[in-house]
Image (cartoon, rainbow, N blue to C red):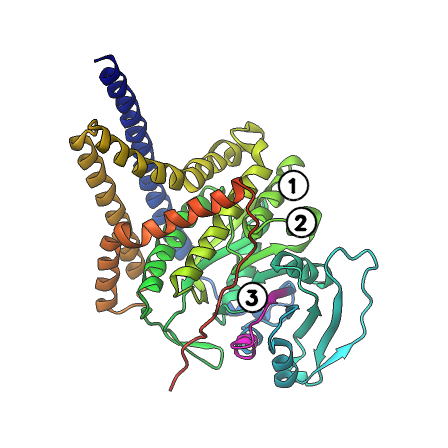
Amino acid sequence: MFQSDFFTIIVDYINIIFLMFTIVLFSGYTVMGYLATKHTLHYRRKNSFGDLSKVMASPLAPSITIIAPAYNEGMNIVENVRSLLSLNYVDYEVMVVNDGSKDDTLEKMIAAYDLVKIEQKIDPNWQSKPIRGIYKSKQKAFHKLTVIDKENGGKSDALNTGMQLSNNRYVGCIDVDCLLLPDALLHVVKSFFQRSGKRVIAVGGVIRVANSCIIDGGELEEVRLPKNWLAKFQLLEYTRSFILGRMAWGSIDSLLIISGAFGFFDREIALAAGGYDTNTVGEDMEIVFRMRRYMHERDLPYTVEYIPDPLCWTEVPEEVKIFINQRDRWSRGNLETLTKHKDMFFNPKYGRLGMLSYPYWFFYEWLAPLLEFFGFLSIILFYYLGILNFQFFIAITAAVFSFSVMFSFFAIFWEVYAYNQYKTKDILVLMLFAILEPFVFHPLVTFSAVRGNYKKLFKIKSGWGTITRKGFSKAT
């Protein structure tokens, strides 16, 4: 009898914890949806009167270096570089850092862009892997292109190399397989200069899924829904995450991550903060943490801007194994960054970052998948012991499922209202996938997060992993 009462008390306490966690989660996502909607409407209204072409023509337009690390990107490298060279901006440089590729990435660039090795002085106190050569084109048409060939040191090492060799005011750190829209740099530059009282130290933006889209000559010809089922789920996730989640955090100046596929930084502040950390696999999140800390600790007014326009398109994994490896790495990167900056946790010294952003990231981005996993195991255990409260279990499961589907629907409808890039039948397919997501896609994400945390906590060696590109679809 005593044992039965004890288990009942334990189950009641667990039920209360899960109920409170769910209520806070629902409230948080509702507020995020409101903030994202309000800020996006404000952004569209504010930018509907400006002429971006004046930014490009202005002699005051700042110089930008786009740094694109490349490792075994021979399949798409020529077309991707061509895309970067055709952006609507005057004073910019494309710096491709060949990070010790084992395929024909460098050879293809040399042949396509008529590159020759040049002499350039390099700091003897260089902290990155050795540079084997610096290349420029003999043709004036490609004068904006610089190719750095170096020994393999990872993405962070390649980006630090580009930052050190760049002489421009701003640097854009992107994935070389990404496709930037022609006006992308105009939007970025405008974001850097639209604040008067604060220094904009970084600008991020929406990442869209390019799988099955038609790309020709480095330009996006036609937006299409991915044919692959896994890519469809990721499209839904990206729509929800970038259009609502990050937009909401950006609206209250509390954004803690800028995607590595599309991030622009004030080069002076990035270098002063130490550049990218080469000892983490979550470098895109970690550099935002350290740049924000640098400004906070010196009491310098600053902000991080976020652009809701879909300016960058990328290829997402279509194979389950590659996808799990990617999300495994993201989880390890999250834990590494949170651990490294743990003194920010509920620290009023860092304002909203310490009191709101960091706790949210800790509880709902890092801890939530672990709670879900152990919650599932608890349900099995409680059922086996005969103490599972079926009514509570069914009620909270139905509530979570309904809310997640409604939130996904809201993201889809907001995408239609704001950008309307997909056909009606594609929207209906996305809505169907929103209903299936909790049963098919979300368990994969949770499993990947648990595996990544297990590897990190038990110090199982695991690096970046290999991501195989299938290449963009071309017009026929």
Q: Are marks 2 and 3 in contact (CB under 8 Å)?
A: no
Name the element at disc 1.
helix
Q: Quadrant of the C terminus?
A: bottom left
439 drawn magenta:
no
Question: Distance from label 1 to label 3 (Cα)?
Answer: 30 Å
Q: What residue type is disc 1 on?
A: Tyr
Q: Where residue 308 appears, x then y in whole percent?
A: 42, 56
Q: Is residue 334 above or below residue 5?
A: below
| Within-10-Å neighbours for mark 1: few <14, some 14–19, many 20+ | some
Q: Looking at this view, is 344 or 87 the one in front?
A: 344
Percent coordinates x, y for residue 320 in the rendering: 38, 61
| Residue 261, image x, y percentages | 51, 60
Residue range corresponding to the magenta coloring: 65-81
For mark 3, does the 10 Å Cα neighbourhood hold few (<14), some (14 to 19), or many (20 or more) residues? some
Residue at which label 3 appears: 55
Residue occupying image coordinates x 26% and y 36%: 380
Decide which of tag 2 and tag 3 comes sooner along the chain: 3
Q: Badge 2 is on which residue? A: 269
Rounded to the nearest angstrom, the CA distance separating label 2 from label 3 is 23 Å
Circle on res. 294: 1
Image marks 1 and 2: residues in contact by CB distance under 8 Å: yes
Near-viewer residue (410 or 381):
381
Whichever of labels 1 and 3 marks the residue nearer the N terminus, that label is 3
